[in-house]
Image: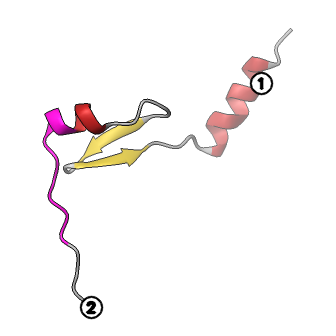
Amino acid sequence: MVPTIRQKLTFEQFLEQCPTEGRYEFVDGEIVRVLATRKHDTIAGLILFQP
């Protein structure tokens, strides 16, 4: 098996290719999706259902 070598993105390429849905970061030349932790979800739920 031949390993796949991915070329790192420039910041300009990141801005062009970054998906519009969700949250993403530019880390070491790659697009990385940012997911909420359990605590973030719990706090967001509490705020959402406040009277």
Disc 2 target residue? 1
Residue furthest toward the bottom? 1
Please report the residue visible at 67 percent of the width from the left and 36 percent of the height from the top.
41
Q: Position of residue 50 (x, y in %)?
A: 82, 14
Please report the residue visible at 19 percent of the width from the left and 63 percent of the height from the top.
6
Q: For mark 2, give the secondary structure.
A: loop
Please report the residue visible at 65 percent of the width from the left and 39 percent of the height from the top.
39
User: Looking at numbered disc 2 in the image, what kind of residue is underneath it?
Assistant: Met
Q: Position of residue 33 (x, y in %)?
A: 43, 45
Disc 1 target residue? 46
Q: Colour scheme used in the picture?
A: secondary structure
Q: Earlier in the sequence, mark 2 or mark 1?
A: 2
Please report the residue visible at 22 percent of the width from the left and 86 percent of the height from the top.
2
Marks 2 and 1 in Cβ contact (< 8 Å): no
Residue furthest toward the top? 51
Q: Which quadrant of the structure image shows residue 24?
A: top left
Against 6, residue 29 (above or below) is above
Q: Which residues are magenta?
A: 5-13
